[in-house]
Amino acid sequence: MTRADLERRLRDARWPEPAADLRARVLAAAPVLNQRVTWSDRVWFSRRWRVAAAAAAAGAIAMFSLPDAADAIRLVPTPQALAEAQVIDEAGRDIGLPATVAQALAHRTLRIDARASLADRTRLTLEALVVEGETK
């Protein structure tokens, strides 16, 4: 008889049932605790909570992947900003910068001007609301 045969016979053997009085003594000696289920247990073991957490995480990732509203607004640059961008583009080409770098610098000037004008409009709107007494 090999060790594998012995282990198989032990696993297949029928174990005797404990006596009823032994079971009663063990259950009587065991402390009965009336524990409440905590919120963390509910969250961890609840399928609804796990699905809701996964949906919230997916929603947060989706929101961060969307472009900002300030970037999505198309603002018309002022004539002064256009003139400055043209001067920057011409100066960049005169000093020997590649055309793409000069254009990138000019576009950056226009974006900075557009953001500044958006910030100015927001500030003026908030000041108008304060004057009217409608602050929130």
Image (cartoon, grey):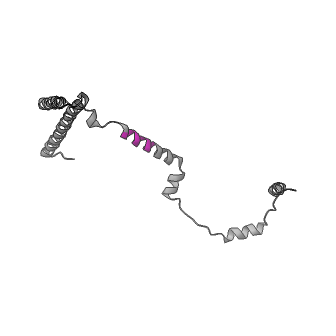
Give the dominant element type of the magenta stretch: helix, strand or loop: helix
- Residue under the image location 12 percent in, 45 percent down: 131
* Outermost residue toward the front in this view: 96
Q: Is residue 4 above or below residue 88?
A: below
Q: Position of residue 135 (x, y in %)?
A: 19, 47
**Viewer-proximal residue among 25 and 109:** 109
In screen coordinates, is 23 left or right of 122?
Answer: right
In screen coordinates, is 20 left or right of 101?
Answer: right
**Viewer-proximal residue among 44 and 133:** 44
* Outermost residue toward the right in this view: 1
Q: Is residue 32 above or below residue 69?
A: below
Magenta span contains residue 63: yes
Q: Position of residue 13 (x, y in %)?
A: 83, 57
Dividing the picture into quadrants, the one containing residue 74 is: top left
- Residue under the image location 47 percent in, 44 percent down: 54
Magenta span contains residue 56: yes
- Residue under the image location 49 percent in, 48 percent down: 49
Q: How many marks?
A: 0
Q: Magenta part of the protein: which range?
A: 55-64
**Viewer-proximal residue among 86 and 32:** 86
- The quadrant of the rendering that contains the N terminus is bottom right
In screen coordinates, is 129 left or right of 100?
Answer: left
- Residue under the image location 39 percent in, 43 percent down: 60
Q: Position of residue 43 (x, y in %)?
A: 50, 52
Q: Position of residue 102 (x, y in %)?
A: 21, 31
Dividing the picture into quadrants, the one containing residue 14 is: bottom right
